[in-house]
Image: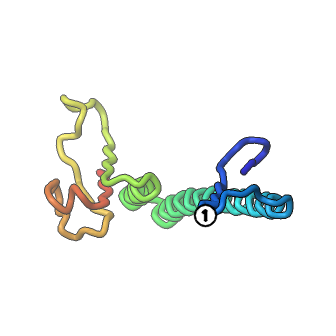
């Protein structure tokens, strides 16, 4: 199976019972099947690319919507950023820290406001055990 002159797969046929050569008509039919398989593979690849692009655009529109609906509030925007990043990147966890002034020792903020964005309601502020670690959680600090 060739796409743009490059091999992307094969179709292998066997005649175990009675080994014999394939006829020209069978070979032409097999070439047609291979061409159809290449088209199907390419269609799936293009569909996945289109879906991924749409997901990126959706994530960006959610962030822009949060910005436009909360022009004076930072927390909803940061929540939207973290939630989109977790979902789009397939991450299990995310933290967004906003630092004002000097960076605290160790590079982490002294207090973090953890806000889960995943399906696990058992994630509580600061809880990093069990379902919270296994679940999809986005965290942000405003």
Q: Residue shown at 85%/58% (left/top)?
A: 24
Which of the two residues, 130 or 111, is positioned nearer the viewer here?
A: 130
Residue 60 in picture, x, y percent from top left: 55, 57
Residue 129 drawn above or below residue 102: below
Residue 50 can be seen, yes or no:
no
Which of the two residues, 77 or 83, is positioned nearer the viewer here?
A: 83
Which of the two residues, 100 or 17, is positioned nearer the viewer here?
A: 17
Residue 30 in picture, x, y percent from top left: 76, 61
Q: Residue shown at 39%/61% (left/top)?
A: 76
Report the colour scheme.
rainbow
Residue 58 can be seen, yes or no:
yes
Mark 1 burial class by Cα count in 10 Å: few <14, some 14-19, many 20+: few
Q: Residue shown at 41%/55% (left/top)?
A: 90
The image quadrant of residue 86 is bottom left
Left or right: residue 30 compared with residue 84: right
Left or right: residue 8 compared with residue 78: right
Which of the two residues, 11 or 2, is positioned nearer the viewer here?
A: 11
Residue 8 in picture, x, y percent from top left: 67, 47
Residue 9 in picture, x, y percent from top left: 65, 49
Task: State the count of labels.
Answer: 1
Element assignment for label 1: loop
Left or right: residue 105 compared with residue 115: left
Q: Which residue is mark 1?
A: 17
Q: Residue shown at 45%/63% (left/top)?
A: 70
Direction front: furthest residue: 18
């Amino acid at each position: 199976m060739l796409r743009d002159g490059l091999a992307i797969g094969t179709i292998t046929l066997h005649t175990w019972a009675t080994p014999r050569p394939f006829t020209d008509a069978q070979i032409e039919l097999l070439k047609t099947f291979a061409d159809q398989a290449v088209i199907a593979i390419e269609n799936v690849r293009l569909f996945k690319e289109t879906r991924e692009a749409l997901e990126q655009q959706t994530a960006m529109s959610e962030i822009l919507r949060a910005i436009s609906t909360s022009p004076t509030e930072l927390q909803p925007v940061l929540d939207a950023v973290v939630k989109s990043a977790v979902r789009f990147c397939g991450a299990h966890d995310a933290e967004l820290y906003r630092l004002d002034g000097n960076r605290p020792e160790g590079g982490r903020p002294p207090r973090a406001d953890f806000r889960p964005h995943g399906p696990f309601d058992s994630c509580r502020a600061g809880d990093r055990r069990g379902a919270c670690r296994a679940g999809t959680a986005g965290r942000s600090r405003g």
